[in-house]
């Protein structure tokens, strides 16, 4: 055998991964409620001045645009986005109720 054998039944994501286009999503496999996208984001303290936020955002987008950075992230299965603060806020706002409900259902208590 020339390398590891890889077998995936589905990915737990809303969309198929570009690096593994033949692997269906869990929704396509019959489990539409099972979606847990992995994401990374940069957050700044509340009341950070807008010019600083803009500078951080522009530097982040510029870094994510570098071919070697994009290639490295894609090799790890990441989809490089670098979207706006408003788009990130909307994503986080949609995720909080989903995970809060799951935590309540599982009996998770904050410490």
Image: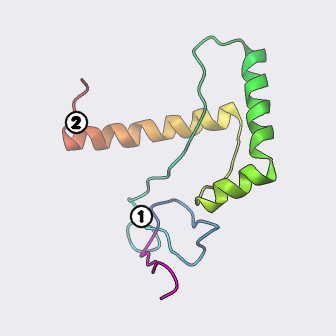
Asked if residue 4 is among those painted magenta in the image, a careful observer would answer: yes
Residue 61 found in image quarter? top right
Furthest-front residue in this view: 2
Percent of width and height locating residue 9 = 41, 76
Chain part drawn in magenta:
1-10
Residue matched to label 1: 32
Percent of width and height locating residue 37 = 49, 52
Q: Is residue 27 left or right of residue 41?
A: left
Q: Residue at x 22, y 36 (%)?
A: 108
51 over 98 or under it: above or below: above
**Dot 1: element:** loop
Q: Earlier in the sequence, mark 1 or mark 2?
A: 1
How would you rate the neighbour count of disc 2 (Cα within 10 Å): few for under 14, some for 14-19, many for 20 or more?
Answer: few
Furthest-bottom residue in this view: 1
Marks 1 and 2, Cα distance to the nearest angstrom? 24 Å
83 over 17 or under it: above or below: above
Q: Residue at x 57, y 63 (%)?
A: 15
39 over 56 or under it: above or below: below
- Asked whether disc 1 touches disc 2, contact meaning CB atoms under 8 Å apart, the reply is no
Residue 101 found in image quarter? top left
Q: Depth-wise, is mark 1 or mark 2 nearer the camera?
A: 2
Percent of width and height locating residue 80 = 68, 51
Residue matched to label 2: 108
Q: Residue at x 60, y 74 (%)?
A: 21
Percent of width and height locating residue 40 = 56, 41
The overriding secondary structure of the stretch rendered in magenta is: loop
């Amino acid at each position: 055998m020339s390398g590891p054998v890889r077998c995936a039944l589905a990915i737990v994501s809303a969309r198929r991964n570009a690096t593994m286009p033949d692997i269906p999503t869990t929704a396509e496999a019959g489990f539409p409620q099972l979606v847990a996208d992995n994401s990374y984001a940069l957050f700044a303290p509340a009341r950070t001045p807008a010019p600083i936020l803009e500078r951080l955002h522009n530097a982040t987008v510029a870094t994510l645009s570098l071919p070697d950075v994009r290639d490295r992230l894609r090799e790890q299965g990441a989809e490089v986005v670098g979207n706006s603060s408003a788009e990130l806020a909307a994503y986080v706002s949609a995720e909080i109720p989903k995970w809060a409900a799951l935590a309540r259902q599982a009996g998770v208590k904050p410490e």
